[in-house]
Amino acid sequence: MNSDTKKILKLTFILFLICAITAGILGVVNEVTKDRIYMQKNAKTIEAYSVVLASDRYDEVEFDKAAFPTVDVVSKADNGAGYVVQSTFSGAQGSITMVVGVDNDYKCTGISIIEHSETSGLGANAASTAEVGVKFREQFVGQGEDIALSKAGGSIEALTGATITSNAVTEATATSIAVVKSLG
């Protein structure tokens, strides 16, 4: 073997060791933190449920998953107030996970965005606790299955610079109401 081949093999071996050590460290960190991350996500979801429809407990119900592919879970409030629908759908920059409260008259009682990857200062405002986000989400309360953005003849004002996100949230809310309506 010539010296160039030895150098390449030596550098390849060093790079392999660095990658193996890094992967091992990331694996250990993942194992150590996965339970805590799960607990935090679960707590956030439970809080979101209570924000959109107050109840002590929510019982998961069966629904037609094929007819509503973006809907993850439909849960009935044990106090008879209605349902909470959790769905994951595409926004402008990636997936959005949201819960929608739906009362027995098939009206939205509130929405809460649990997770998203929308652009900061634009689509991310839909989930923001700042005034712009709160005002955007408050528009959905009392809306029915015919909910739409104002530019499509509805009453929901889109977030400035975030029409795709606004439309996605509005459509997901309409889908949530429709899936509850399909339950009868």
Image (spheres, rainbow, N blue to C red):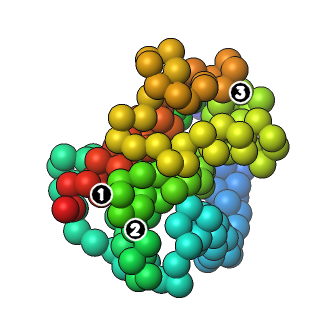
Label at residue 180 = 1
Compared with 31, 177 (above or below) is above
Q: CA distance from mark 2 to mark 3?
A: 32 Å
SS at circle 2: strand
Q: Residue at x 53, y 67 (%)?
A: 53
Compared with 35, 95 (above or below) is above
Residue denoted by label 3: 122
Q: Residue 165 appears at what percent x and percent y?
A: 56, 30
Q: Residue 179 appears at what percent x and percent y?
A: 28, 53
Q: Residue furthest top?
A: 151
Q: Residue at x 57, y 21 (%)?
A: 163
Q: Which quadrant of the figure has residue 50?
A: bottom right
Compared with 174, 162 (above or below) is above
| Amino acid type, mark 3 | Leu
Q: Residue at x 52, y 78 (%)?
A: 55
Q: CA distance from mark 1 to mark 3?
A: 30 Å
Left or right: 174 as drawn, with respect to 38: left
The answer to whether any part of residue 133 appears in the image is: yes
Q: Residue at x 35, y 41 (%)?
A: 145
SS at circle 3: loop
Label at residue 82 = 2
Q: Residue 74 appears at what percent x and percent y?
A: 35, 64
Q: Of discs 2 and 3, which sits in the foreground?
A: 2
Q: Of discs 1 and 3, which sits in the foreground?
A: 1
Left or right: 6 as drawn, with respect to 179: right
